[in-house]
Amino acid sequence: MATEQNSNSIELSESFSVTAETLFKAWTEADQLKKWWSPMGDSLENVTNELNEGGEVSYHFKSGDFHVTGKYKEVIPGEKLVYTWNWEFKDGLPQESYLLTIVFKETENGSILHVKQDEFQDEEVAKPHKDAWRTALDGLKSYLQGASETTQSSDQANLKSDEGMSDRSGGYNELPEQAKVGGA
């Protein structure tokens, strides 16, 4: 994972073994987002994600201790998102407002996700965000690898021979442990 930081922004890039379209959907679809993103250990409860310029972004969490809101400034489906990223805390902590630029790039072996978060006051404020992004991207990678492996396993389990029998049964219509071996 590549990371860059100056006093007003952080940038991270991560490679994934899935297409940019799959990566984009995992980032923007509520049911997928809920499976991998849990900032500060909290789970997403409600997601609004209006993928158009001026569209609303809203993430509400089960604890109710904070929520994230924003507006899309630029949306290129499957390629790029630019949006405001406003953290509002229940316990009186100051509200934090940033600008996110997320780029999804297709590569020969999958895709690259590039995250840029702008408008930090100073490096001290940026450090916990950089650490949180690393954790989030690790969670996204684990989620996508698990989803990919599940799909591959499911596809393999459903393979059929020419006679319509499961390839795992040795060509017989029994469970694998009941398969006849050596013609006997």
Image (tube, rainbow, N blue to C red):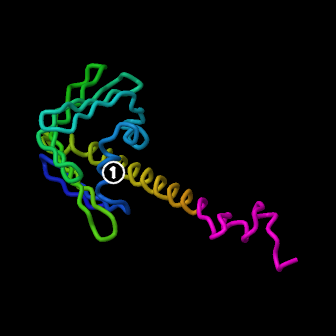
Residue farthest to the bottom, as pictured: 182
Q: Amino acid at mark 1?
A: Arg
**Rendering coords of residue 139 (x, y %):** 41, 49
**Residue at the image position 59 percent from the left and 59 percent from the top:** 158
Q: Position of residue 68 (x, y in %)?
A: 26, 30
**Can you give x and y, in whole percent of width and height, for residue 151 in the image?**
50, 56
Where 176 sits versus 55, above or below?
below
Relative to residue 168, is residue 118 depicted above or below?
Answer: above
Whether residue 26 sits left or right of residue 100 in the image: it is right
Seen in the picture, residue 104 relative to 164 is either above or below; the reply is above
User: x, y (%) of residue 29?
Assistant: 33, 40
Which part of the image, by quadrant, shows the C terminus? Answer: bottom right
Taking depth in this image into account, of 13 and 25 the one nearest to the observer is 25
The stretch of residues the image draws in magenta is 157-184
Which residue is label 1 attached to?
134
**Residue that lies at the very extreme toward the right in this rendered image:** 184
